[in-house]
């Protein structure tokens, strides 16, 4: 085999060319792993964010489950014979409003298959203090009664108190 003899200038050009080729090869070989590293870092960050979100949801669900269990316990502790109509009627009687024209009516706005009792209460000419006392008495116990709808709350036509119409709901026991 014949040996090539390169002059100084040619040798420098060949060495620079080899270094350039080696540099390009090294950069190309290093670029793909670096790109994958960056992509995986982004994926890890997104996974951590999703994990934090899932932990937050889990805490919310656990809190809601605890609240639901507390409501179920309160419902089980409530008398089996609880009747929303009778309960509201007794409160109106205790406050002397039934004799003054307060009216109660059983409602059926929810589907009949639902387990919710509804009562519409109409008061005429009550003072704000009397209304607050009635609401306190309704909400005071562990009977799970809620104000579903406040239809009317306005000054009475004779300007002596308030007229109001509201619907209360409670789960059937």
Image (spheres, rainbow, N blue to C red):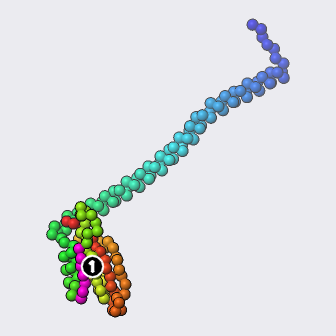
- Please give the name of the residue rendered at 69% of the width and 30% of the height, measured from the top-left corner: 24
The residue depicted at 44 percent of the width and 49 percent of the height is 51
Residue 120: image location, x then y, percent = 27, 76
Please determine whether, in this image, residue 160 is positioned above or below residue 146: below
Q: Place residue 16 in its image quadrant.
A: top right
Among the 4 quarters of the image, the one containing residue 10: top right
Residue 65 on the magenta segment? no
Residue 145 in percent (x, y) is at 26, 71
Percent coordinates x, y for residue 94 in the rendering: 20, 84
Residue farthest to the top?
1
- Tell me: 144 left or right of 49: left
Image vertical order of residue 89 relative to residue 17, above or below: below
Q: Which residue is mark 1?
A: 121
Res 95 quadrant in image: bottom left
In this rendering, the answer to whether 128 lies above or below 32 is below
151 and 4: which is toward the camera = 151
The residue depicted at 23 percent of the width and 71 percent of the height is 143
The answer to whether any part of residue 97 appears in the image is no
Residue 30 visible in this rendered orientation of the protein:
yes
Q: Which residues are magenta?
A: 100-106
Left or right of residue 151: residue 2: right
């Amino acid at each position: 085999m014949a040996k090539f003899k390169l002059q100084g200038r040619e040798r420098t050009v060949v060495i620079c060319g080899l270094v350039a080729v080696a540099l390009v090869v090294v950069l190309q070989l290093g670029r793909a792993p670096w790109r994958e590293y960056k992509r995986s870092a982004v994926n890890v960050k997104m996974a951590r964010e999703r994990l934090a979100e899932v932990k937050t949801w889990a805490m919310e669900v656990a809190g809601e489950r605890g609240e639901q269990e507390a409501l179920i316990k309160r419902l089980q502790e409530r008398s089996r014979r609880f009747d929303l109509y009778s309960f509201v009627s007794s409160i109106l009687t205790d406050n002397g409003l039934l004799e003054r024209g307060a009216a109660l009516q059983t409602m059926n706005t929810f589907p009949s298959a639902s387990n919710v009792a509804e009562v519409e209460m109409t008061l005429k000419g009550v003072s704000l203090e009397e209304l607050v006392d009635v609401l306190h008495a309704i909400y005071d116990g562990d009977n799970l009664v809620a104000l579903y709808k406040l239809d009317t709350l306005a000054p009475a036509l004779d300007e002596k108190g308030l007229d109001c119409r509201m619907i209360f709901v409670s789960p059937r026991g």
